[in-house]
Amino acid sequence: MPAKVRLNSRNHSGRIRPHEHTSYLALAVLVLLVGAFLAVLTVSSFASASPGPQSSSISLTGEMPGPPPSTGASITYPTDSATFQNTPITVSGTCPSGTLVEIYKNDIFAGSTPCNNNGGFSVQVDLLYGQNSLTAVDYNDLNEAGPTSKAVNVTYNVQTPPVSSLLNINFTATQLLLETSAVYRGTFPGQELYVPIKILGGVAPFAVNVNWGDNSNQVIPSSINQTVNADHVYKSAGIYKISIQASDSQNRLAFLNVAAIINGQAGSVAGSSNTSSGPSANKFLVLWPLYAIAATLVVSFWLGEKREKHVLADKLKPVPTLGTSVHTNH
């Protein structure tokens, strides 16, 4: 039979063990230093934050639609019934400042140019054989069209014109023509701009020269009537005049001038999220509750030890015995 194990309790000696590895004074100084450092970082992060919308809001930038131009462009030159022996010709007139003017010949896009600060425009236009009905339309920044101008009818006479009007024109005949989109908007610096150029008529092979308006040229050869794609990257914002010239094997020439609008720097996005204090300030705000918890723990342990000492000190006081007298010597 196994021997019984008997546990004897040992009375407490009544002596308080010293806390040799705990220095509440050092902990208090450390807590105060951390609090001061955290306060300085929080204040500086709020001071350096850029002003903006309220916290957790979203900032949107854009253009609100407005009314189209109420005043249209007007062609002052050439005059009605004018006759020309050579092409291209210069078409000029008046327009509302800040708009973009597009010229059409027999309802075919013929060129575009910005209206200058003096309320005028001037652009070179290549004519069709025979009669040309020239009109102008102005557009605002949102590409909304104003009223179409009164038509100006001019005639382009050549030795053997293949047609007398657009309705009968044969694009496979000898006249060389160029066609492209009316205007190019919304491109940013550093982004590639593509311009499709359609070659009509003439006799192959062809050579298309594109002057981008920033001292850059591009030559594109073509062996057939087709659409060739010109591409370019602008380095800075602005309005550029793209001059396009084509030639064929018979030394015939065709011209087209187009305006390209290059907006501000890319990265100005349409929508962005913003806060008033910034991410760094928010991180510091999250640290304050953790700091408060740490400081409370230090104070709680210190108060607990003080109370423990007080309780143990009370236990060590001698308890008076009944019937015992205390004598005092005088």
Image (cartoon, rainbow, N blue to C red):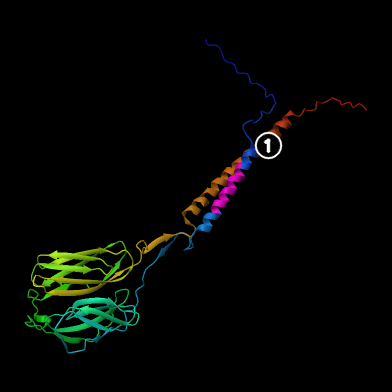
Q: Is residue 143 above or below residue 159?
A: above
Measured as percent of width and height from the top left, residue 96 is found at 32, 82
Residue 44 highlighted magenta (yes or no): no
Task: Kindly indicate the quadrant of the structure image that contains residue 312.
Answer: top right
Q: How many marks?
A: 1
The answer to whether residue 261 of the structure is visible from this angle is: yes
Q: Amino acid at mark 1?
A: Lys
Q: Indicate the quadrant containing the C terminus: top left, top right, bottom left or bottom right.
A: top right
Question: Which residue bears the numbered disc 1?
Answer: 306
Nearest to the observer: residue 235 or residue 305: 235
The magenta-colored residue range is 30-42
- For image coordinates 24% across by 82% down, the residue present is 136
Helix, strand or loop status at disc 1: helix
Measured as percent of width and height from the top left, residue 122 is found at 26, 80
- For image coordinates 55% across by 11% down, the residue present is 3
Nearest to the observer: residue 85 or residue 181: 85
Task: Kindly indicate the quadrant of the structure image that contains residue 23.
Answer: top right
- For image coordinates 17% across by 87% down, the residue present is 153
Task: Kindly indicate the quadrant of the structure image that contains residue 319.
Answer: top right
Q: Could you tell whether 223 is left or right of 286 in the image?
A: left
Q: Is residue 233 above or below residue 100?
A: above
